[in-house]
Image (tube, helix red, strand yellow):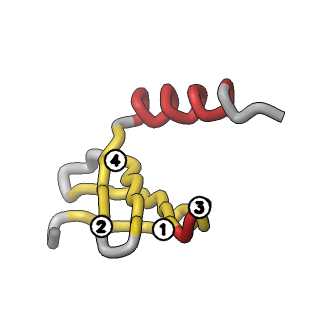
Amino acid sequence: MADETIRDIAKLELPFRRKASIREVRHESGMRMLRLVLREGTRITQVDLDADTARELGQTLLDNAGD
């Protein structure tokens, strides 16, 4: 979209030749979101997260990462 600025934060190689990327998306209105993009072959899933949801997802991943 023309009204958003996107900055790449991270790109990850996942098991089974899958890929993930995390981007910061700033809208013209000033709203900031994190965009999680998952790629599996030609399939792309994109999810925009607000700050609270990103924190909750991050904590859940940390809590379940194991050793």
Which mark is nearer the camera, 3 or 4?
Answer: 3
| Mark 2 vs 3, N-terminal side | 3
Q: Please tell me whether mark 4 sits on a helix, a strand or a loop.
A: strand
Q: Residue furthest front?
A: 16
Which mark is nearer the camera, 1 or 4?
Answer: 1
Q: Specify the amino acid type for callout 4.
A: Arg
Judge from the rendering whether residue 30 lies leftward or rightward of residue 36; answer left or right. left
Q: Which residue is mark 3?
A: 14
Query: x, y percentage for residue 27?
Result: 24, 56
Q: Residues within 10 Å of mark 4 (few under 14, many from 20)?
A: some
Which mark is nearer the camera, 4 or 2?
Answer: 2
What's the CA distance linking mark 2 and mark 3? 14 Å
Q: Specify the amino acid type for callout 3.
A: Leu
Up-down relation of residue 30 to residue 41 (above or below): above
Q: Please tell me whether mark 1 sits on a helix, a strand or a loop.
A: strand
* Quadrant of the rendering where the C terminus is positioned: top right
Dots 2 and 3: beta carbons under 8 Å?
no
Q: Which residue is mark 4?
A: 32
Which mark is nearer the camera, 2 or 1?
Answer: 2
Q: Which mark is residue 8?
A: 1
| Mark 1 vs 4, N-terminal side | 1
Q: Please tell me whether mark 2 sits on a helix, a strand or a loop.
A: strand
What's the CA distance linking mark 4 and mark 2? 25 Å
Q: Which residue is mark 2?
A: 43
